[in-house]
Image (spheres, helix red, strand yellow):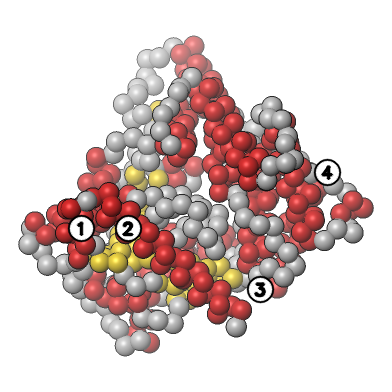
């Protein structure tokens, strides 16, 4: 019988203190020894390879030699991309670049930008390693002048590219681009303006980077086992599902989980609506429930509201740095602990809403490409996981056989400064559309190659 998640005992804690981002030679040395084993045992990747063209290597060479300032805009569909790319840039990029006749003037590296919540749920390993490989935290939903200053300094001073995910978080969809945030484009344009004002003749380039997970026979076997696990937690017997097609089994599980959420949020099931329309109702009901429990009424678009809820919940579990626990009474401390526990439960609604916004796409059939079938099963399990109170931390990702890194031609922001000065909003929108097209071109090219 499947065991439900054990509810954790949440205690309020002081906020996490991180050292200033820097590149520690000792930590890089330790990563060289340990990171390959970590990537294999925790992410399952046995091989990470770049696509055959030279775009990635040439962009790095220009950045490392000071000829440009590079912002790597990488896709983030799976969750492990920053770790995989950090390892690849540090320890594999030089070897592949030499094969194309390109030598770097210094050891290659990239400094990543990440949401501050990562070190709150990521544990002590993340809290130690990330600042020591130059990674920079940023808040999504409140002013962070210190964090933004770090980012601009990293771009302006170089020498390493800055890596940031324009999707803003894990997007769960590798073969589509559900959403891009304009922040990376705005940052790039502002940096280009600053360099121009200082008469520094180095263009700011956006390097679109697309990542593609591919699976072997073991992935196929594991996907079948994960689907059976989903059926078990939906309480479907083998007798009920053995005569159903692959698509019918997925539909049956998906519909059961959806109906469970509709019942939970007292939404009247309307079978005349599509799955996406019904799921949208669940998404907003979950977010509104979280806001109501927090006693807030936020304004703005969906993601502004969602980030605000997440930030408030985390800030009740990890109190701001200025808070002093000394001298408070046991009653006061207990109240803070209770508020932290309440925030954890409220965040379960936010976690469900966050995932549901992305969970779209047709049900895969037997003829669907293996990586798409596996991705859908992973997401279907995550749909059940979030319904039961889980979070991204509890997500099950099937181990891939290979990660392919595909770079698209760079987007030169310095060349577009005149357009940006003329109409900032239009320039950002146009450049963001070009970035999205670059990702879609990479996706289409990789799928054409796979189909042979």
x 90%, y 59%: residue? 243
Identify the residue position indicated by label 3 in the image: 216
Above or below 138: residue 90: below
Q: Secondary structure at mark 1?
A: helix
Q: Quadrant of the N terminus?
A: top right
The residue mark sitting in front, 1 or 4, is 1
Residue 17 visible in the shown view: yes
**Label 4 environment density (alpha carbons within 10 Å; few <14, some 14–19, many ≥20):** some
Quadrant position of residue 103: bottom left
| Residue 388, x across and y down, in percent | 68, 38
Along the polypeptide, which appears first: circle 4 or circle 3?
A: 3
Q: Badges 1 and 2: C-beta atoms under 8 Å apart? A: yes
Above or below 328: residue 129: below
Identify the residue position indicated by label 4 in the image: 235
Q: Nearer the viewer, residue 66 or 7?
A: 66
Quadrant position of residue 88: bottom left
x 35%, y 22%: residue? 324
Along the polypeptide, which appears first: circle 2 or circle 4?
A: 4
Label drawn at residue 419: 1
| Residue 432, x across and y down, in percent | 35, 57
Of all residues, the one furthest to the front in this rendering is 272
Q: CA distance from mark 2 to mark 3?
A: 39 Å
Along the polypeptide, which appears first: circle 1 or circle 2?
A: 1
The residue mark sitting in front, 2 or 4, is 2
The residue mark sitting in front, 3 or 1, is 1
């Amino acid at each position: 019988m499947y065991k439900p998640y054990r509810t954790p005992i949440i205690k309020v804690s002081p906020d996490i203190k991180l050292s200033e981002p820097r590149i520690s030679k000792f930590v890089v040395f330790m990563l060289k020894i340990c990171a390959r084993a970590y990537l294999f045992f925790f992410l399952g990747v046995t091989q990470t390879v770049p696509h055959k063209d030279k775009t990635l290597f040439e962009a790095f060479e220009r950045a490392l030699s000071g000829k440009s300032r590079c912002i790597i805009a990488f896709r983030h569909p799976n969750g492990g991309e920053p770790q995989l790319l950090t390892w690849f840039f540090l320890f594999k990029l030089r070897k592949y670049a030499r094969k194309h006749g390109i030598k770097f003037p210094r050891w290659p590296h990239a400094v990543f930008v990440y949401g501050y919540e990562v070190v709150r749920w990521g544990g002590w390993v993340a809290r130690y390693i990330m600042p020591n490989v130059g990674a920079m935290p940023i808040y999504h939903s409140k002013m962070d002048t210190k964090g933004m200053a770090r980012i601009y300094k990293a771009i302006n001073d170089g020498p390493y590219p800055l890596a940031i995910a324009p999707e803003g978080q894990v997007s769960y969809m590798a073969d589509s681009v559900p959403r891009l945030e304009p922040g990376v484009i705005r940052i790039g344009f502002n940096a280009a303006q600053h360099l121009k004002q200082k008469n520094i003749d180095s263009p700011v380039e956006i390097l679109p980077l697309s990542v593609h997970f591919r699976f072997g026979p073991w992935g196929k076997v594991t996907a079948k086992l994960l689907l059976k696990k989903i059926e078990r937690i939906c309480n479907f017997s083998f007798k009920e599902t053995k005569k159903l097609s692959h698509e019918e089994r997925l539909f049956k599980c998906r519909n059961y989980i959806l109906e469970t959420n509709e019942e939970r949020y007292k939404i009247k099931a309307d079978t005349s609506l599509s799955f996406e329309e019904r799921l949208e109702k669940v998404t907003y009901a979950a977010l509104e429930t979280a806001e109501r429990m927090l006693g807030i009424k936020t304004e703005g678009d969906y993601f502004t509201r969602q980030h605000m809820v997440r930030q408030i919940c985390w800030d009740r579990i990890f109190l701001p740095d200025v808070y002093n626990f000394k001298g408070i009474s046991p009653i006061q401390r207990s109240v803070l602990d209770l508020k932290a526990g309440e925030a954890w439960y409220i965040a379960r609604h936010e976690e469900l809403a966050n995932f549901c916004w992305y969970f779209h796409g047709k049900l895969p059939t037997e003829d669907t490409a293996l990586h798409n079938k596996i991705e859908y099963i992973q997401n279907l399990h995550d749909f059940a996981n979030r319904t039961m109170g889980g979070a991204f931390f509890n997500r099950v990702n099937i181990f891939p056989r290979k990660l392919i890194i595909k770079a698209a031609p760079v987007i030169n922001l310095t060349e577009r400064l005149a357009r940006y000065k003329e109409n900032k909003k239009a320039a950002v929108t146009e450049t963001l559309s070009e970035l999205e097209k670059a990702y879609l071109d990479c996706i289409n090219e990789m799928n054409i190659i796979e189909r042979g």
